[in-house]
Image (cartoon, rainbow, N blue to C red):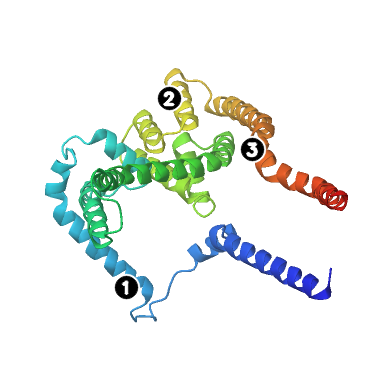
Amino acid sequence: MTTATLIFSALVFALVVTISLAVLVRWLPDPGGQRLAQLTQPTQANAGVTPTRAWQQAQSRLLSALLWLSPWTAGLSGGDSEQPTALRLRLVQAGWRAPSALPIFYSSKTLLTVMLPALTWSLLEVNQWLPAGMTRLALVTAAAAVGYYSPDALLNMRIQRRQLALSHAFPDALDLLRLCVQAGLGLDAAIERVGREMRHARPLLSEEFALTGLALRAGASRADALRHLSQRIGLKEIDALVVMLIQADRFGTSVSESLAVYAEALRIQRRLKAEEAAAKLPVKLLIPLIFCVFPSLLTVLLGPVAVTLAREFVKVV
């Protein structure tokens, strides 16, 4: 191998490593940096038109347009503004609690269902070399289906992402809640204190606990506030915790002992899930091993043998 080849390989390796690091920094930001950015409030000195303000203005105009179209699009999408319980609950679980979330969802769904087929048809008409007839009609129908179901898919992705973040934050919150109750705080004060202490580390769970504390201070019963917390989050762990706390409050059992037992059961459950994931790992590794590693390994091992045999056969012939 010559020196030029070595230098070229080193440059290619450095380029790949640099691009990989840039992608990781872009898509996996530092949590500490995010917390510092949240603590740093922007000053009022920069009053010029920045890209952020321009984007906010564009968002507000788009929001106004969608709200203007909502009275018609809600009926076209099959929505009911009087009793939208299932869809509104999904929107709440996704973190969209504004009253305008439901009209915006219906408007986006209807506009995408109409505009994507129209855009597809126009592109097909411009490019005459593309297939015509039933194939073109199938493409337009597929575009309409994508436009109709894409808001639901995005909503499901948002819910899953938010529930994943909440499930990661829940064990720490449970330990803090148990410590606060054992230290002498009541359950209502403990929930509010845990939400206040976790507002920078776990903002999503802190927001949910803050809403529960506001509901309790507004006069709602503890059972109703906890049930609303379970509905807003939609996790099995939170459902089990809420049922346990309601039963402890109803029958007069110790809340701290109930939290300790549930924390231990949750740790066992998480350990079993980790063991299950570790047991599935060898099976999941078979596909990249068979299709990526083994062909390269066979090429390296059998390549010289094949070249040698080919040369010997040429000499014999």
Tell me which numbered mark, 3 or 2, is placed earlier along the sequence: 2
Tell me which numbered mark, 2 or 1, is placed earlier along the sequence: 1
Quick one: SS at disc 1? helix
Q: How crowded is mark 1: few (under 14 residues within 10 Å), some or many (20 or more)?
A: few
Q: Is residue 277 visible?
A: yes
Q: Which residue is drawn at 82% across and 51% down?
A: 307
**x and y percent of residue 155 in the render?**
36, 44
Question: Dot 1 corresponds to which residue?
Answer: 54
Residue 184 in the image: above or below residue 210: above
Residue 256 in the image: above or below residue 61: above
Mark 2 vs mark 1: in front: 1
- At label 3, the amino acid type is Ile
- At label 1, the amino acid type is Ala
Q: How far apart are marks 1 and 3 (CA)?
A: 47 Å
Quick one: SS at disc 3? helix
**x and y percent of residue 27 in the render?**
54, 58
Q: Distance between the residues labelled 2 and 1?
A: 48 Å
Question: Dot 3 corresponds to which residue?
Answer: 287
